[in-house]
Amino acid sequence: MKNTFGNSIAVTVFGESHGDCIGAVIDGLPAGIAVDNGFIASRLSLRRPAGSISTSRAEKDEFKLVSGVVNGVTCGTPVTVIIPNENVRSGDYDYGRARPGHADYTAYLRYAGHEDYRGGGHFSGRVTAALVAAGAIATAALEKKGVHIATHIARCAGVADRGFEDFEKDRQKLENEYFAVLDDSAGALMKEKIEQARAAGDSVGGVLETVVCGMPAGVGEPWFDSVEGMLSHAMFSIPAVKGIEFGDGFKLADMRGSEANDPLRVKDGAVYTEKNSNGGINGGITNGMPIVMKIAVKPTPTIFTPQRTVDFIKNENAEISAKGRHDPCIVHRARVVADSVCALTLCDILATRFGADFLR
Amino acid sequence: MKNTFGNSIAVTVFGESHGDCIGAVIDGLPAGIAVDNGFIASRLSLRRPAGSISTSRAEKDEFKLVSGVVNGVTCGTPVTVIIPNENVRSGDYDYGRARPGHADYTAYLRYAGHEDYRGGGHFSGRVTAALVAAGAIATAALEKKGVHIATHIARCAGVADRGFEDFEKDRQKLENEYFAVLDDSAGALMKEKIEQARAAGDSVGGVLETVVCGMPAGVGEPWFDSVEGMLSHAMFSIPAVKGIEFGDGFKLADMRGSEANDPLRVKDGAVYTEKNSNGGINGGITNGMPIVMKIAVKPTPTIFTPQRTVDFIKNENAEISAKGRHDPCIVHRARVVADSVCALTLCDILATRFGADFLR
Amino acid sequence: MKNTFGNSIAVTVFGESHGDCIGAVIDGLPAGIAVDNGFIASRLSLRRPAGSISTSRAEKDEFKLVSGVVNGVTCGTPVTVIIPNENVRSGDYDYGRARPGHADYTAYLRYAGHEDYRGGGHFSGRVTAALVAAGAIATAALEKKGVHIATHIARCAGVADRGFEDFEKDRQKLENEYFAVLDDSAGALMKEKIEQARAAGDSVGGVLETVVCGMPAGVGEPWFDSVEGMLSHAMFSIPAVKGIEFGDGFKLADMRGSEANDPLRVKDGAVYTEKNSNGGINGGITNGMPIVMKIAVKPTPTIFTPQRTVDFIKNENAEISAKGRHDPCIVHRARVVADSVCALTLCDILATRFGADFLR
Amino acid sequence: MKNTFGNSIAVTVFGESHGDCIGAVIDGLPAGIAVDNGFIASRLSLRRPAGSISTSRAEKDEFKLVSGVVNGVTCGTPVTVIIPNENVRSGDYDYGRARPGHADYTAYLRYAGHEDYRGGGHFSGRVTAALVAAGAIATAALEKKGVHIATHIARCAGVADRGFEDFEKDRQKLENEYFAVLDDSAGALMKEKIEQARAAGDSVGGVLETVVCGMPAGVGEPWFDSVEGMLSHAMFSIPAVKGIEFGDGFKLADMRGSEANDPLRVKDGAVYTEKNSNGGINGGITNGMPIVMKIAVKPTPTIFTPQRTVDFIKNENAEISAKGRHDPCIVHRARVVADSVCALTLCDILATRFGADFLR
């Protein structure tokens, strides 16, 4: 349903970049989940622009939980988080001249000229702040059940990070890292490349890899509400995501079955697979191994370099160069959004399987 | 909802590989859509195993439309298609010994030992025949509205097909092709590789590319029900799909914005983009350019080569070699399934936007 | 969604009165529920026309469970029941001449003349046979969890039955009764009145009262998915139902709060209410007392008496007298449909609250 | 989904009586609908307590549209309305002592003691203010399409109002009436009875009748998403509603078919029915006649008279007398809530049928 996602635990997002506020409603969370405002704030800080590799729009993200939480604990009724917009400079936007790669033109078509175009309106990455706040509650609930999520910048501006080795150690390294890489020298090189793109009035993209450990086996559904189906549906809501793959993903296409299949073994009574090319999911259902997925994040479409475009009001060719404040890269900021969207979806999948109280 | 997908036009699948029948219910189709049994049959024939590159299980796919259609026209009420199962040899399956890469073990966990394991049960690719029959009705409705879908085997067993050049011509070439490639010599090489894998008791995978022309611009939703979100959700229901990308997909991750953005132009009053790296979708909404997506299909997990596995009933290590009849490759058979799932999803998206009668 | 209802356990109905078959898909039932074909058959027999107070259309209701059940136990995947139509005499229907009180004219408007009008098509009470078969599985699952449902004809043709006194005893009396009254002399009088209406070429209506004992307390949702909201939504799908009330229902409107409120008491550590004017539901959530509801069933619209109507094809005034075989009363046959729809809805509510495995 | 309702246009409510604010998100409204803050304010004033027949809790209802509306016009993205809570006196509530007839005890069971019990929390009628604000936007959109809704107090404290005679004239009389009756002398008597109840520390209930003129014929769905099913589902979300009937409702149960059926006629090419016992709906689909429904509103459960209850924390018998500020009657205030819920549901039904842009 448009701006709502989830069967048992559903999140609804609302708000425009330059409107009053953005926010989210999470419905279906059980009563009794601890909500730590400090943790939400720290998650929001990972998404917030910072330094020269981000936009200079300063957002304090002074979120407010306006319903569903009393004394730091969920009541069981809808949890609503609201984040006021501040530091808005709508003058930087020039209606009619579509930014290539952005939703300006499609929003105009979809909403017949009534869309709030200021700062990308409802299509702005700004709205993901609400997903991060909502996701922080989901993340904390999952962690109490032993389900841990970690996302790193697997690739940025053409530079690759190393993969996960020791999940628990790597996860802790990533946790409060603003630029979440496992190999700091790769991270330094990525930032260098981002700076170069920024200097050139251009932008870069990347790949985020998310790994989930501790999900119970036997969770998910066949056919449409497979774990892959649900996660991909949710992940594509993150602006700029253009691809997703699970386990070895597109590499599996070139393998033979004998190579792609993950041999099963029993050890101390527990079943595991010797490797994890299937990313922890078979037939849409978790098998107890880590869930592994990668998402492709395209380069930020708003760039300072002049581009050919149209003025869709005048219906004529035009040129555009971004004014104002824009990110030369959003991959690092999207990291915590991926974590959050993943957490919300997994909470929903678990609640569908075991009832929402499972998460308490 | 598990085995149902779609907001305005929803499809529900049911059935097990070795049960009485498999089938689908499509709810929400408008009254007055022509239903051509010959077309449904021809679409089913593209999915049916044939020749040495497929399983030798012979299915006649004698489908029956048991509700919602009178005199070759939809009534507006749920359309139900039923396809009886025949030629079933359940003895070939050995309960407890999980096929690596398949859903045997996860189904056991999910359904606590009550799953119908014969032939993969509800997880069998057999169920996709129902999606193809349902999809044929959706495909025909879309074609009458000028929306055309074509899928080719972009890659199989490591061999690449050429890309689309002249969509309309290429689409016609693919239409009734059992092994749907644009470059026949690439196709011949793919089949050779499939034969080699079969001879080795092994299997291969591939990549399917789907292109949609004629979709109205301005269709889709922001955030969760984006065109990408909906299509990916549906596509991951096809067994063996482990990745999806739109437009240039994962390649976008390594581009700069100036390269990834599609410049807009006006010609004869119509807006188009000079290239289509974004696959016809911006901000989750169609921009009028072709929708382009690729899905990764892993190699068939059931192979004749001995594999390490577990017997999950005895909870001990075991070995497994497939008995019976299995596909060394399902990529070519999955082609029409991808077309069908895409058609059903686009019908739903159009009905959500314009009302279902738009499709009449 | 049109022909689908339920959040966690959803039922989809399909089929037309004079088509191939009617049927239902139930998705979300847990694996491991015993399915007794004899019980389904006995439930269907309570809905089947019998004697002079029903239509003479003879239906054998030879249902078939074509998916989701193996060896009498659910697999966890969609359960599909199909009931072939037989004994069809489509010639009795005269297209264009709308039966007053029936859906002939609205179906024509809704489906633009493509509706299957034979025997009422998809709007026929015939489709409720599928709900009864599906409901029988739900009913059996609930009974194993101590949840018992009983419906009696509280009123028919102006004659009132007595109310429930000893629920367990009364329920057993009703269980296999074709004409389900608690007071047999009232029942005899009702039948007499039905015969009189039939003789006059007319029909009668009535009220069904459904009581549910054993539902866990604390189940349901605030606001939209209240127990009342869900049950009423489902109950209005039964053709001819035009009203529903819970507890003392419309009588509450004339009471004072001191009279309408149900005083709470504790006995042996258990909370109960001294009376049950609220029908076991407060704030949309069960309180542990019996759920009590009444539905109003209007008289069968198809009657032999001549009526003023229109021919909507010719767009002119016309007269109509039913030909063929019709029920002078459907209240007694609707009884088991009410039981069934109630059972399906309560299974859904319980699965939403506790996870579907609760029902195993 | 719990606190969300609607297929194409969905409303989500959130908030607690004594929390920060209450509010609603409406998703799916087309772009381009005029939003008049003055009209929203006037609708809210009809729900606000006033005079001696209401609670003395003073709420200013200073609503704010924080998303989805720019310059008084919808953008097409989610519209969020927020209404701050003020004048909160939480000390009046005594946790553990359940008010009979209220949700105190069931909320405790449902949310395991984590519910926000202050002022009834999420179960408070206070939340209906958000439905009224959201409903005002829906109402205005419908009026522009010629669909008019009017609700009057058909019955209160045992006193009956007259029925609708001239709909348009009656509707205008009711429109801005705080105590919406058609017969002022009946209204005066009702208020007298309310005062008497208040003086006795007691409360009264009533019946609201809602009539909708101008709905297009041929709208709605068969089976589950019938107009009756959708409206009843939504209407039962209004606290204190315990019954609903369409057309002649429960009275139909005692009629014969010849009396209950509405004869159809053609006049000037237009089809109508000579009377409207079916309330404008046949087979779940509108027939073009006015939609007529009645809802039973039980007396306010919170009364000053001492009542037997339990302390569910101590698990022992107790006595309770309301402290603080409470309504001796909410029927008149529920009127605009009924209008609003009806308007939201009809917008959803129309958008499902014709696409949301129909409402523009």
Image (cartoon, coloured by chain):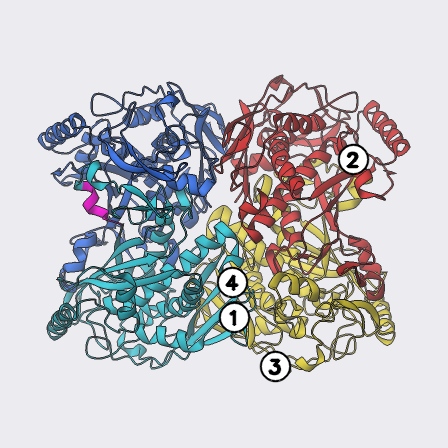
Chain colours: A yellow, B red, C blue, D cyan
Q: Give the left or right position of residue D219, taking residue D151 as reference.
A: right
Q: Which residue is mark 1?
A: A81
Residue D15 % position (x, y):
41, 69
Say which of marks 4 and 3 sits in front.
Answer: 4
Are the numbered discs 3 and 2 placed on the same chain, yes or no? no
C-alpha gap between disc 2 and disc 4: 40 Å
Query: Is residue D251 magenta-colored?
Result: yes
Are the numbered discs 4 and 1 placed on the same chain, yes or no? no
Q: Quadrant of residue D61?
A: bottom left
Residue D203 % position (x, y):
17, 68
The amino acid marked with disc number 3 is Glu
Which comes sooner in the sequence, label 1 or label 3? Answer: 1
10 Å crowding of disc 4: few (<14), some (14-19), many (20+) = some
Which chain contains the residue that carries disc 2? Answer: B
Q: Which mark is residue B172?
A: 2
Q: Which residue is mark 4?
A: D360
C-alpha gap between disc 4 and disc 1: 30 Å
10 Å crowding of disc 2: few (<14), some (14-19), many (20+) = few
Q: Nearer the viewer, residue C149 or D220?
A: D220
Which chain contains the residue that carries disc 4? Answer: D
Residue that sits furthest to the right in the current view: B185
Q: Which residue is mark 3?
A: A86
Q: Quadrant of residue A88?
A: bottom right
